[in-house]
Image: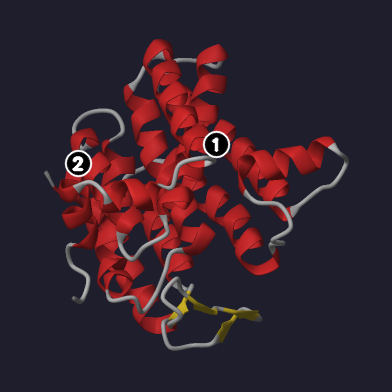
């Protein structure tokens, strides 16, 4: 029992402690962490590193280097976009289109970097499970990267990505993937209160990490066919987001709207 809950406890405690330490600091590590959110309010982006490091700490406590790699790798490339990102190209299509024309945007670097870290995390998970490496590993890496990207696409309102991490992580708490899901959920619990209050936000750093760790948990549970189905679904949602606003869909669906607003100040 202790081994099952330890990753979540460590992740939550680490994320909360880091959040408390850095939330009022304007500059950390030579970088500015203050931003303005969708409502025009000043917030801190420090939640992103707090989440990613917390999830990685939980993964380490649970003996899952793959989950730690998924969290920190995706967070590092998310931080690049948070602090050095350009706004000339938007979305997956925009960044890949720019890359096809010889223009390397920070978004393109992030896409490629998260893809690489996802592949390494999938390889580490498959080796640890004794599966060996193969096409299933490549599909797994792509699934982790797609999940990281979707986590970022959802991070448009307070608490949304963290709620999705909690809801999707819960079914993965048993068996393979348990450490990764517990770490993702624990870090979410440790950062969700200031996020819901609109005092902090995950940014690309934390949202990519949340999606990647949940994606890894799913990959650890699935064989090749399941991974492929998951990848197709995630890719479909990503492509759909280029034309359809997730926020508009949520706001027009009563159940989703109430869940999305739950916990925020009225």
Q: Residue furthest front?
A: 252
Residue sticking out furthest to the left: 1
What is the CA distance from the residue labelled 1 to the residue labelled 2?
Answer: 21 Å
x 36%, y 42%: residue:
63
Which percent across, then down, holds residue 225?
Answer: 40, 11
Q: Tag 2: Cα neighbours inside 10 Å, few (<14), some, or many (≥20)?
A: some
Dot 1 surroundings within 10 Å: few (below 14), some, or many (20 or more)?
Answer: many
Residue holding disc 1 = 118
Residue at point 41%, 51% (across, down): 154
Q: Is residue 35 above or below residue 82?
A: below
Badge 1 vs badge 2, beta-carbon distance below 8 Å: no
Residue 28: % across, % down: 57, 81
Assign a secondary structure to mark 1: helix
Q: Which residue is drawn at 31% across and 67% down?
A: 191
Residue 188 makes an appearance in the image: yes
> Which label was assigned to residue 170?
2
Q: In the picture, which quadrant includes the C terminus?
A: bottom left
Nearer to the camera, 226 or 56: 226
**Is residue 112 in sight in this rendering?**
no
Q: Is residue 136 rendered to the left or right of residue 64?
A: right
Question: Measured from the top left, where is residue 193 in percent x and y?
Answer: 25, 72
The location of residue 210, given as percent across then percent down, is 40, 50
Q: In this view, does 206 lie to the left or right of 135?
A: left
Say which quadrant the N terminus sits in.
Answer: top left
């Amino acid at each position: 029992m202790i081994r099952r809950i330890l990753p979540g406890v460590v992740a939550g405690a680490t994320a909360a402690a880091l959040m408390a330490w850095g939330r009022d600091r304007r500059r950390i590590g030579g970088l500015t962490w203050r931003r303005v959110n969708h409502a025009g309010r000043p917030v801190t982006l420090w939640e992103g590193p707090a989440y990613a490091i917390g999830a990685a700490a939980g993964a380490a406590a649970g003996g899952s280097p793959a989950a730690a790699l998924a969290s920190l790798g995706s967070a590092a490339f998310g931080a690049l976009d948070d602090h050095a990102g350009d706004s000339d190209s938007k979305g997956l299509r925009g960044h890949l289109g720019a890359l096809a024309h010889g223009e390397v945007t920070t978004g393109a670097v992030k896409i490629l970097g998260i893809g690489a870290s996802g592949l390494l995390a999938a390889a580490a998970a498959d080796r640890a499970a004794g599966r060996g490496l193969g096409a299933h590993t490549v599909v797994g890496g792509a699934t982790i990267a797609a999940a990281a990207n979707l986590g970022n696409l959802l991070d448009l309102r307070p608490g949304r990505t963290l709620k999705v991490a909690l809801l999707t992580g819960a079914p993965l708490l048993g068996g393979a993937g348990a450490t990764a899901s517990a770490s993702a959920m624990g870090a979410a619990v440790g950062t969700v209160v200031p996020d819901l209050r609109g005092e902090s936000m995950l940014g690309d750093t934390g949202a990519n990490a949340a999606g990647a760790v949940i994606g890894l948990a799913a990959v650890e549970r699935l064989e090749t066919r399941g991974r492929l189905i998951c990848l197709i679904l995630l890719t479909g949602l990503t492509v759909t987001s280029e034309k359809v606003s997730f926020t508009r869909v949520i706001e027009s669906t009563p159940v989703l709207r109430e869940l999305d607003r739950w916990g925020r100040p009225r």
